[in-house]
Amino acid sequence: MRDNQFPGRSVVMSTHGMIAASQPMATQAGLAVLQAGGNAMDAAIAASAVLCVTEPQSTGIGGDCFLLYHEAKTGKLHGLNGSGRAPVRAILEEFERRGLMQAPEFGILSVIVPGAVDAWQTALERFGTRSLEEMLQPAIAFAADGYAVTPVVAKAWQNNASVLVPHAESRRDFLVDGHAPAAGTVHRQPRLAQSLRRIARGGRDAFYRGAIAEEIVRFSRAHDGLLELEDFAAYRAEWVEPIGTDYRGVRVYEIPPNGQGITALMTLNILEQADLRGMAHLSADHLHLVIEAFKLAWAERDEYVADPAFNQLPVEEMLSKEFAARQYARIDPQRAARYPIAPSARAHRDTVYLSVVDRDRNAVSFINSLYYPFGSGMVAGDTGIMLQNRGAGFVLELGHFNCIAPRKRPLHTIIPAMAYRDEDLLSFGVMGGDYQPMGHVTVLTNWLDYGMDLQEAIDAPRFQPGGGVVALERPVPQEVLKALQQRGHVVGRTELSLGGAQAIYVDAKNGVLSAGSDPRKDGCALGY
């Protein structure tokens, strides 16, 4: 199955516990928690905190968090939405007064209240067995004592260093003599270590009500931002009911809107109408069908994925098989649909991912993110905390479902996933911003339709439609590129890797855990 694929590794197998993450240091930290008797939630928080230090372009405690938790003793799947909310002063008129036609992608106006820290504590209090203070210790050690910058991180750091240059605090904490640190050098973040120590001692209140919130708000005011102390004090993560669909006998679950996971579910529903298995893998027929299905789902995403507390969203219709059949009928098998694509449902008006399974078969599908590489590009004063730019997910259009408003959550790209096949379970995710729903579809269809093992499903070359252009990773054959062009697709090669996946499969009958970890990242899967 590895023809035309990235050089792969074997699936990692174990019988007790397993963790897969995009950094070996995070994988090791989580595994140590499991081996010491902690459960999957404990290990996920410990690993995520380490990633917030060792993969700083992707994630941080100034970012957001979503997770799905399979509770083994009840068999119930729980969802936690730790996405940030807009400040009270974030009204459309304020952005119009400043002459803005769209939500800023960088800078202080792209910053909303970070949700990760509250989500971590909320998750541990309900399902963990260890304290937040204990789970933060590995991250504190890496921030204070230093860590080796790994190759993929170093490259991303270099590629995005320009985001840091305009801001004195960012240059101080994330550049060395004005440049990104090189692979194989040691990087320290003493101010971030101090913030982590404060959170370890004081929990969420140290972040949302104490000195950290005060410094972030002082910094925001100094840069003419909108954040206030009341925005931090009011923030709470929210437990939500996962949404799902059946695909070829497997029940697939995602976080509901304001997350974009529904995009993956809609795409799967459309693909289920076709004989994907009858198409050669990575053939023009295969790619054309998936691209066209995804484009239709994407149009619905852009129209309707928003904060459900502010809108009546047509989620039930979007997930129905009847809607999928209507969408499938819109696909021309020989011709690419032209942009813009009209949505069809009716309504009333960079990132890290990790997966953990423990001895008791509790499972966590966990994702934490700053959004763009280095988020807003701004470190909040003396905190050492890089602030996310999730405010860029809003639109500045009166009447739009996703129009900015006080305390509203934007359309969010980070999406953990979980799938069930009889008694077996798959905990998986694919980081990579807007690519994530396509990544979920690609990994699942590689696994279910093309019979690949988890590692092969992750290794296989990827493709992504976006902005009217289909990006192909280098291993996709040239003749396929030409065939897609003949069908009307605008196609280009991407020098960047698309996404980064981690996955763990629980084989209930044999009592074996199998995991795959993406070679596009520095990480690995480990079990015991």
Image (tube, rainbow, N blue to C red):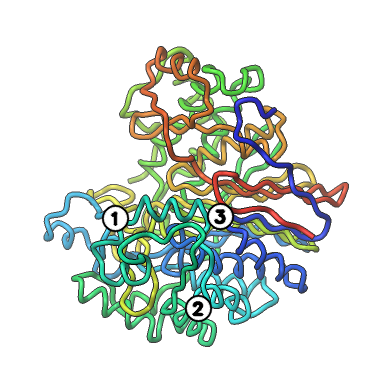
Which-is-in-front pick, marks 3 and 2? 2
Read off the residue under disc 2. 144
Q: Which residue is mark 3?
A: 353
Q: Characterize the local packing of mark 2: few (<14), some (14-19) or many (20 or more) Cα atoms within 10 angstroms.
A: some
Amino acid on which the number 3 mark rests in the picture = Tyr
Q: Residue 162 — which label?
A: 1
Q: Quadrant of residue 74?
A: bottom right
Whether residues under marks 1 and 2 lie with C-beta atoms below 8 angstroms apart, the answer is no
The image shows residue 262 at horizontal and vertical percentages of 50, 43
For the residues labelled 1 and 3, the Cα–Cα distance comes to 25 Å
Image quarter of the C terminus? bottom right
Q: Image check: 224 left or right of 23?
A: left
The residue type indicated by label 1 comes to Ser
In whole angstroms, how far apart are the C-alphas of marks 1 and 2? 25 Å
Of 261 and 500, the residue lying toward us: 500
**Residue 96 at x, y percent in the picture:** 14, 56
244 or 370: which is nearer to us? 370
Q: Residue at x 60, y 53 (%)?
A: 523
* Any part of residue 281 in sight: yes
Q: Which mark is in front, 1 or 3?
A: 1
- Residue pictured at 30% horizontal, 72% vertical: 169
